[in-house]
């Protein structure tokens, strides 16, 4: 079946919180609220312009999305709650794009947030079949189990297979982590800003061969949001055209039968990444060689290696050679994860895909002036969740031009916020929040922090 023609769809506004260690100090309502307010400020819209809302999170009760969105206004629009494992944020973006491109909405607000628990990922429904049960069973059959966290075992095994088949070394995976940590220094939203030598990376605690601790992403609390709009919505605001970023190609793909081929690389979604990349790039009429910058799903350094290969950024089986040649950082073939990636920026599951989008939007606008990548005309995003879903998105500027670096003072004038959010993480004022919230369909009680109130009430029962 031939792909259906899609109407143009743009990312007009983005915003995010700092990614922080999960210590229970900030609730998901605050994380989602901050990200959403910032995205609407960036898009220079109000919540009354929003026709549909999409909330992205993995850990939380049903309708957490409404709890977040009601803080912006109670305008009775549809609000959808999305959980698609680690690709949740990008799944929300794909849904928004489908809504806009199909003509069912002109303006969609996507908000991703996550309040996580310290330590490795956990399952809370142990009285029923796990959605990853067959994946773990295949791993147990082919590679055996260890005491390491399950995700580290799966991705570590993929790294082992890449070594066995193609000649990569443990140091190649360590170099990927070294680069991501080095990149994060220039990202004000990153959970970590520490720089390490390769020797320090390799000497950190072994998690599951070949992975050491500094090659694994942390759990994180955080929020990110994007405003997705139609051509008509943008045309009505021509003064915002320079900041609009076109979603030129996109595909959400799920697993093929090769998932159970007994290959550890296939078990972490190689074919769904290849499928999503092929479809998205074909829609945008680009090849892997057209990209100067890419944000991809480096939950572990081993996955970055496998994904570089699956996206076609390297020749098949040659991703480690690209890494060794300095090809994934500044001065190389393509800058991968200028944000610091999941390994150093952090990984609040529902926010991750939207934070990747924000990073690439800032690059295409020329706003990421402290980490700009020369000759950026196209940007590539990859977000993956086991279970599974892979989302690949191709972005370009609305005017089709190569991004020119913009100084921060100019950004602050254009966005009417007085600063450049790509290089400086700030909060917002009450006046700014009022500017973007619904003008006459809000209620103060929607902003109430009810947890202390309910605990006090229950204590009296």
Image (spheres, grey):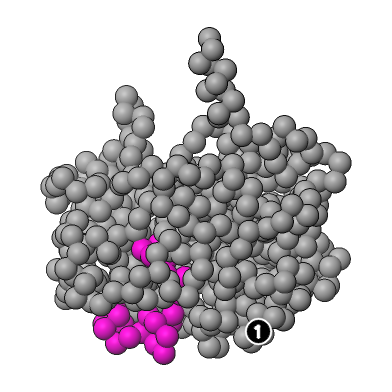
Q: Is residue 294 visible?
A: no
- Residue at 36% of width from left, 29% of height from top? 125
Near mark 1 (Cα within 10 A), the count class, few <14, some 14-19 or many ≥20, is: some
Residue at x 40% of width, y 64% of height:
192
Residue 275 horizontal/vertical position (percent): 44, 62
| Left-right relation of 284 to 233 | left
Q: Position of residue 394 (x, y in %)?
A: 56, 70
Placement of the N terminus among the 4 image quadrants: bottom right
Q: Position of residue 405 (x, y in %)?
A: 62, 86
Q: Main secondary structure of the magenta part?
A: loop
For the image, the number of numbered tags is 1
- Residue nearest the viewer, comparing 180 with 444: 444
- Vertical placement of residue 241 versus 29, above or below: below
Q: Residue at x 31, y 82 (%)?
A: 322
Asked if residue 325 lies in the magenta stretch, the reply is yes
Instruction: Establish if 147 lies above or below 370.
Output: above
Q: Secondary structure at mark 1?
A: loop
Quarter occupied by residue 354: bottom right
Is 130 part of what is drawn in magenta? no
Q: Which residue is mark 1?
A: 407
Query: What residue do we see at 78% from left, 54% from top?
Result: 431
- The answer to which quarter of the image holds residue 263 is bottom left
Whether residue 174 can be seen here: yes
Q: Position of residue 136 (x, y in %)?
A: 24, 43
Could you say which quadrant of the image residue 10 lies in?
bottom right
Q: 183 or 380: nearer the eye?
A: 183
Magenta residues span 315-344
């Amino acid at each position: 079946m031939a792909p259906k023609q899609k109407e143009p769809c743009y990312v007009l506004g983005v915003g995010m919180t700092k990614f922080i260690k999960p210590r229970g100090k900030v609730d998901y309502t605050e994380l989602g609220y901050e990200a959403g307010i910032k995205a609407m400020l960036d898009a220079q819209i109000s919540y009354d312009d929003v026709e549909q809302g999409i909330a992205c999170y993995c850990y939380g009760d049903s309708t957490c999305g409404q709890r977040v969105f009601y803080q912006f206004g109670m305008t009775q629009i549809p609000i959808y709650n999305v959980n698609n494992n680690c690709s949740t944020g990008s799944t929300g973006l794909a849904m928004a794009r489908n809504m806009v491109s199909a003509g069912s909405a002109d303006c969609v607000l996507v908000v991703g947030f996550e309040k996580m628990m310290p330590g490795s990922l956990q399952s809370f429904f142990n009285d029923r079949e796990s959605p990853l049960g067959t994946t773990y069973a295949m791993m147990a059959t082919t590679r055996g189990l260890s005491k390491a966290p399950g995700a580290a075992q799966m991705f570590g095994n993929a790294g082992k297979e890449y070594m066995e088949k193609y000649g990569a070394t443990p140091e190649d995976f360590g170099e990927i982590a070294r680069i991501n940590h080095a990149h994060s220094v220039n990202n004000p939203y990153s959970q970590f800003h520490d720089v390490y030598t390769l020797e320090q990376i390799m000497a950190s605690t072994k998690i599951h061969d070949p992975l050491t601790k500094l090659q694994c992403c942390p759990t994180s609390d955080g929020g990110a949001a994007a405003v997705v709009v139609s051509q008509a919505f943008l045309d009505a605001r021509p003064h915002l055209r320079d900041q609009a970023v076109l979603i030129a190609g996109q595909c959400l793909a799920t697993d093929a039968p090769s998932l159970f081929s007994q290959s550890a690389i296939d078990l972490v979604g190689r074919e769904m990444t290849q499928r999503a990349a092929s479809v998205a790039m074909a829609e945008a009429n680009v090849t892997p060689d057209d990209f100067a910058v890419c944000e991809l799903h480096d939950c572990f350094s081993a996955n970055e290696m496998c994904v570089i290969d699956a996206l076609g950024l390297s020749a098949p089986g040659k991703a480690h050679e690209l890494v060794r040649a300095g090809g994934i950082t500044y001065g190389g073939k393509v800058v991968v994860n200028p944000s610091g990636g999941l390994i150093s920026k952090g990984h609040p599951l529902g926010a991750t895909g939207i934070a990747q989008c924000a990073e690439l939007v800032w690059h295409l606008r020329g706003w990421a002036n402290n980490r700009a990548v020369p000759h950026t005309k196209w940007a590539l995003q990859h977000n993956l969740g086991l279970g599974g879903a892979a989302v690949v998105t191709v972005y370009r500027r609305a005017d089709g031009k190569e991004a020119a670096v913009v100084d921060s003072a100019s950004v602050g004038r254009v966005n009417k916020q007085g600063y450049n959010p790509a290089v400086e993480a700030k909060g917002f004022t009450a006046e700014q929040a009022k500017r973007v919230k619904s003008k006459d369909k809000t209620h103060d009680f929607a902003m109430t922090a009810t947890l202390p109130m309910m605990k006090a009430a229950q204590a009296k029962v």
